[in-house]
Amino acid sequence: MSEPGRNNAEDDDVFDGTAVITAGEFSVESRIRLIGFFNPLDGKFHWQGTIYAKPEGGELKGGTQVTIAVGDTSAQGRITEQTPWGHFSVAGVGAPPYPLPEIELELDVAN
């Protein structure tokens, strides 16, 4: 069974759920779909995806800084563009706005 916000085994690395998007005084609840990865070159976690909200007042546009909150987890991101379908592409660096699944590591340390 998948975790809340995770679709299925094929999309284990994708978060698809509801979030609150805030830009200045503007705030909207929206479906989001995000994926993230650790970049070994800069040592940081990068995430990106789609905000499905379609605000009519122009509050969101390319370059807008946003806060995305999923429950108690939030992160800063930037709107990169509006898609032809009226949705918004978003990207961020650092901890994502969704909880990451816990992982266990086993290290074999040679003496």
Image: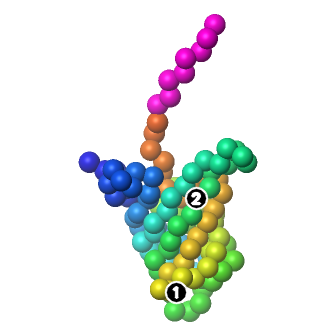
Reading the image, the residue beneath label 2 is 47
Whether 70 is drawn above or below 111: the answer is: below
Q: Element type at marker 1?
A: loop
Instruction: Depth check: give the residue in front, 74 or 62.
Output: 62
* Residue farthest toward the right in the current orientation of the protein: 42
The residue drawn where x is 46% and y is 77% is 52
Question: Is 66 a magenta residue?
Answer: no
> From this viewpoint, is residue 31 visible?
yes
Reading the image, the residue beneath label 1 is 84
Does residue 21 appear left or right of residue 65 in this picture?
Answer: left
Q: Please state which amino acid type lies under the numbered disc 1.
A: Pro
Does residue 66 appear left or right of residue 20 in this picture?
Answer: right
The residue drawn where x is 66% and y is 57% is 93
Q: Position of residue 40 (x, y in %)?
A: 67, 44
Q: Position of residue 62 (x, y in %)?
A: 66, 80
Magenta span of residues? 104-111
> From this viewpoint, is residue 71 visible?
no
The residue drawn where x is 72% and y is 46% is 41
Q: Within 10 angstroms of label 2, few (less than 14), some, or many (20 or more) residues?
A: some
The residue drawn where x is 57% and y is 51% is 37
Question: Of marks 1 and 2, which one's residue comes earlier in the chain?
Answer: 2
* Residue farthest toward the left in the current orientation of the protein: 1
Residue 82 falls in which quadrant of the image? Answer: bottom right
Residue 44 numbered mark, or none: none
Real-space CA distance between mark 1 and mark 2, rounded to the nearest whole angstrom = 21 Å
Q: Within 10 angstroms of label 1, few (less than 14), some, or many (20 or more) residues?
A: few
Whether 26 is drawn above or below 33: the answer is: below
Q: Quadrant of the C terminus?
A: top right
Q: Element type at marker 2?
A: strand
Q: Mark 1 against mark 2, which lies toward the viewer?
A: 1
Q: Main secondary structure of the magenta part?
A: loop
Q: Position of residue 16 (x, y in %)?
A: 41, 63
